[in-house]
Image: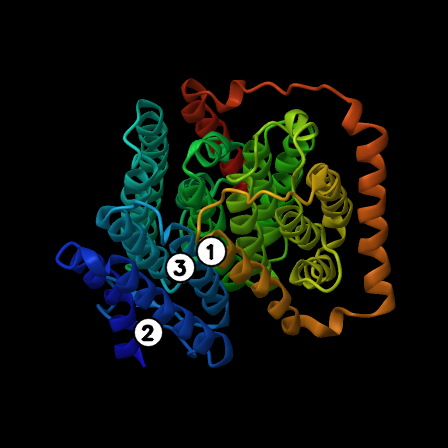
Amino acid sequence: MSTITIAWIALPFFVGFSIYLLPQLDRYLALLVVLTSLLYGLERLFYPLAPSWQLLDSFGVTLQADSLSGYFILTNALVTMAVIFYCWHSNKTAFFYTQAIILHGSVNSVFICADFISLYVALEVISIATFLLIAYPRTERSIWIGLRYLFVSNTAMLFYLIGAVLVYQANNSFAFAGLSKAPTEAVALIFLGLLTKGGIFVSGLWLPLTHSESETPISAMLSGVVVKAGVFPLVRCALMLEEIDPIVRFFGVGTALLGVGYAVFEKDTKRMLAFHTVSQLGFVLAAPEVGGFYALTHGLVKAALFLIAGNLPSRNFKELHHQPIHTPMWIALVIASFSISGFPLLSGFGAKVLTMKNLLPWQVIGMNLAALGTAISFAKFIFLPHEEEHKPVKVKPGFWWAIILLLGGLFAANVVYYEAYTLANIIKPLITIALGWLVYLVIVKRLVVKLPRVAEQFDHLIGVMSLMLTLLFWMVLA
């Protein structure tokens, strides 16, 4: 099985570079790679590989492919497949599909890594591929956004690499398990790198501008899967090491509240979705035991929402109230919004119920407030005007194939936790959603609040990392 896993990891890189030799088959080759990942992810979900295994003794590489990996790999496969469908009839070149598949393979590598040096290599490849995709339009704006992302990412990974070296000094191994015997500064430095890479708490405030200003399919990939490359190792470490769990949970609650606080008052559709990505990553971290299922649900929803938002008449909510959207698109928007709000019959319901059942007592109030904020935020989409137009709406030819795949996944994933459908479990989210809609219609809809963007400015992003490092030192020492 280890041979199959290594071949599966190598396949995207081999095919990705082969696309240049066979550009006329770029879409088909990319789809082949993603289908392979889909099958591998499903196999790991139902038949997890037992313990981790080492390829190069204590020097790394250590791999672990269990059910947690399966959820994240499945998310990566479905989101990337939807993006390929979306771009199928576009004028994207072989270069685009090459980078998309290399990014796909790099993200998959993260999901089976169990040592810090292999993880570092995978995260750095992700940074390069992501930069090239963000800058793909070759406009001044896109190149600046890409360089900004690359600078923040590389700075964060420099901190991470120093921490990884300290782990090796303490254990003669880069394995995740060595974090328990590593010095305080190693834990703080590694966590700073991963929190920044994953867009967590204030160190992740680079995320809203990057995700909202990228091209629509790139935004879907960034929010659907790429940021989870930073979140996955945090979830893995929390499950492996009892002393790490409270730190991860704390950042989960803080991130959920910070992101939703911005999302509630945001007037731009893509920025609202980007801030909500920050918030939803907090839900993944708040209950590591069920983080895989929540990551799958969030990846499908957020990819669908970004693809839909990219095809709306405007990005401004105020303008959308005067430009009714096509009813079929509004229905797709409502289904995705219902799922992320925790409405029954969609996998977001089961994911939220599971998360709430696995919270510690001190997390409950904060996460319930975050759930209420989610309902308020997505009421902005649900209450948009819509109409059945007689003239055809111009969307990309592959748009509906992508949306059907993602929304179909939300219905299908319900089977993972069908036990959630009890009367008590159904009533609570319905009350939360109803209360959120009421708050939106009575208060939020009439407010004009412009939150400051100072912390998002490029000048302050590295300074915020320094503050986060101080906080992490204090938390680890405590």
Work out which quarter of the rendered image holds the N terminus and state it: bottom left
Local SS, label 2 = strand
Residue at horizontal 53%, vertical 42%? Answer: 477
- Looking at marks 3 and 1 on the same chain, the residue that comes earlier in the sequence is marked by 3
Q: Which residue is mark 2?
A: 53
Residue 232: assigned label:
1
Q: Looking at the rendering, which quadrant does residue 272 occupy?
A: top right
- Residue 254 position (above or below residue 357): above
What's the distance in space between the residues labelled 3 and 2, CA to CA? 13 Å
Report how many numbered discs are placed on residues in the image.
3
| Residue 297 in view (yes/no) | yes
Compared to residue 464, the image places residue 359 above or below, namely: below
For disc 3, the neighbor class at 10 Å (few under 14, some 14 to 19, many from 20) is many
Q: Which residue is mark 3?
A: 176
Protein image colouring: rainbow
Viewer-proximal residue, 154 or 470? 154
For the point 61% across and 70% down, the residue is: 412
